[in-house]
Amino acid sequence: MTTPLLPDDYIALLDPRWSTREATGTVVRVRSETDDAATVIVKPTHPWPGHRPGQYLRIGAEIDGIRHWRAYSLTSDPEHPEGLVSVTIKHVSEGKMSPWFTEQCGPGTVVFLGHVEGEFGLPDPLPEKILMISAGSGVTPIWSMLRELRRRAALDDVVHLHGTRTTEDFIFGPQLRELHDDQEGYHLHEQLSSEDGRLQVDNLDELCPDWREREAFLSGPREMIDDFVAHWEAEGLEEHLQTERFQPVIGTGDAEVGSGGTVSFVVTDKEATCEQGISILVGGEEAGANLPYGCRMGICHTCVGVLREGQVRDLRSGEVHGEQGETVRTCVNAPEGHVVIEL
Amino acid sequence: MTPPTGASTASIPGTMDDEKAGPSRRDGDPNAFNPLFRLSSEQIEEIGAEFQKIHDEVKGDLGDRDAQYIRSIIEFHRRLTALSRIVLMASRYPPAWALGTAGLSVAKILENMEIGHNVMHGQWDWMNDPQIHSSTWDWDTASTAASWKHSHNYVHHTYTNVIGLDKDVGYEFMRVDPKQRWSPEFLAQPLINVLVMLFFEWGVAIHDMDLEAIKKGTKKKSDLMNDLKGIGKKGGRQVLKDYILFPALSGKHWKKTLKANFTANIVRNVWSNAIIFCGHFPDQAYTFTEEEIADETRGGWYVRQLLGAANIEGSDTFHLMSGNLSYQVEHHLFPDMPSSRYKEIAPKVKAICEKYELPYNTGPFWQQWLMVQRTILRLAFPGGDETPKPGPYVAPPEQPRAERTVQAVDGPIPAFP
């Protein structure tokens, strides 16, 4: 009746937040955690569908007329009584969004809420002995998981090793120290990289001699994760280690999987060739096509196009998929042979 | 009327009839007629670089005020539509009918011209807002977004005014340039012209089907069926909305509502037809042959866009209602630049025209429109001359003014207060 618009578009005239076209939320408070990290607390417009501690939320905001998206770990409890959610963000001075969140965004700002995603989290049933390893802002998903364990009264035997530059830089440091003092089952070790050097695999035997018997959860910078993963693999224990990298390795050309292929963009009317490991989005842009994109890491679905012909390979998992009519994310999928896409 | 350069030699009507549409009579003296052929290749590249600079400057400057502009227009359109529908509930009173229908007509024009056309051009894609994006937008007209984006954004804007390549030159069923070969079916052109005016949206809807190939029987049957399905689905929804659902909601006054919707669609069709025909068919605009653009560079493309389009002079409201296609020259140079910026860059474009002694095609609405109508009537018959072209652009002398009476205001074209 309102084609090509939706009745929603007219309802949104009364209050933009009533539109169901996009999930939005209003910033309630921005709480400073350390000198350069802040927790942004958001009241979602629609009831929060829930999440698992350890997962991340993609969150979008408009900065000078342009919508940007980032993914941050959720630091709020899944069932907050007022339905609030929060993400904790470390200021990266050369970044675009983190300075905006930590310095400019205030109560009342409307933000866009994307999907909750991520496999990092507590297994079911809960392991008896747990080792948490984090560094820098990697502590945020760990914090969520620890709080969940405490809520479930399951903080029985957890060793937490955290690397931080200084004592003051430790995000959630005060709360975790308190937890350490209160709870017998939680042991926290802070390693100050400014004094004792970075947290390394060599420290493990000394700091947590029984690490081989524990389910381990690891969150931090990429180099650190690579080192620890290699260490676990060397012992054949990789099944007992979960990691959160924050920087997915995709579409950079170094993933040696798949055949690559050619893409026909039917709307843009462009032909592109993608070498092995090059996403449809990057290939199309190199061929001069103006394609929609958002996060460029497979989470925001801004770049989706309908597949008309052919199959694609997910550059993250290596899985080949694609049925006619399926919507695929061009930023994390590469053509496997020839594909035709509606974009 | 004779061209100022006197290059046209075809004074006897009908000399073009039997010739292949192709290299025009300016073959004899290629430099005499089209300013493009007077420029050296270095000059063309220089001009290209200067236009590119304007583009990049604006692109780097896009921000909040632009985002606010398009959002305010979209909101205004939706409010006006909703309000008009409410007024039309009282359509049994003639003043209410007239007011509601006028509101609906204006809303439809805004939606098609300033919003739909420009959003689907990708002018607002830089905002990265999925709701205001060329890949997701659909408009209140019979044609599907995908087919229009192909025929318009790609075919028309790439091959602008190249006879044989740009299907917008006469839309494959009209003869608007003497270089198009005449055939007897064009005798019906004066009548077809009126029908196209009235039912323009349906003409646009079938435009991407490649009528030429269908006539010749070279179009694949499955492609044809796909096209028809797309048009049927989109057009069907439009008909259902305007001619069945809304009238049905009006109960026993359904006829009034039906008439209001029909009138609004016709008003929108006639208006958009007038603006769009004034973009490339007035006398000032140049057309090109395939041979002439064979080795075209980026700079050559810019010059061809400049020469092939014509502006319409008017007030800010007029520009808004024409979707800023009254800045057709600026639009063709920078199809993906937000339309609200055309007015701002027009002086820079004129300065380039003056520097390189190029024309800046423009004229008042009625003059441009009557020129187009005259061409359509004349070219229904065999023959026809190249139309006279304007000389290089010269900036008007600055008016001496005792003192500034009004503070100059920078910014996008205001919508409505």
Image (cartoon, rainbow, N blue to C red):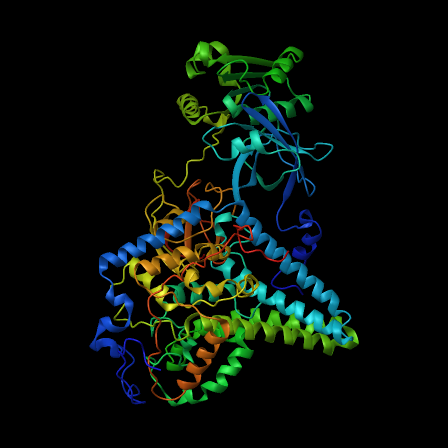
Is residue B129 found left or right of B258 in the rendered image? Answer: left
Give the left or right position of residue B287, taking residue A108 as reference.
Answer: left
Residue A209 visible in the displayed image: no
Quadrant of the rendered structure where residue A24 is?
Answer: top right
Q: Position of residue A25 (x, y in %)?
A: 65, 40
Between residues B53 and A220, which one lies in front from this camera angle?
A: B53
- Asked whether the viewer can see residue A245, the reply is yes
* Residue at 55% over, 72% down: B271
Residue A233 in the image: above or below residue A24: above
Asked if A335 appears above or below B215 in the picture, the reply is: above
Residue B309 in percent (x, y) is at: 40, 67
Q: Position of residue B27 (x, y in %)?
A: 22, 76
On screen, residue A193 above or below A307? above
Measuring 55% from the left and 15% from the top, which residue is drawn there?
A168
Residue B312 at x, y = what percent? 47, 68
Q: Given the current orientation, which residue lies at the most extreme front position?
A: B402
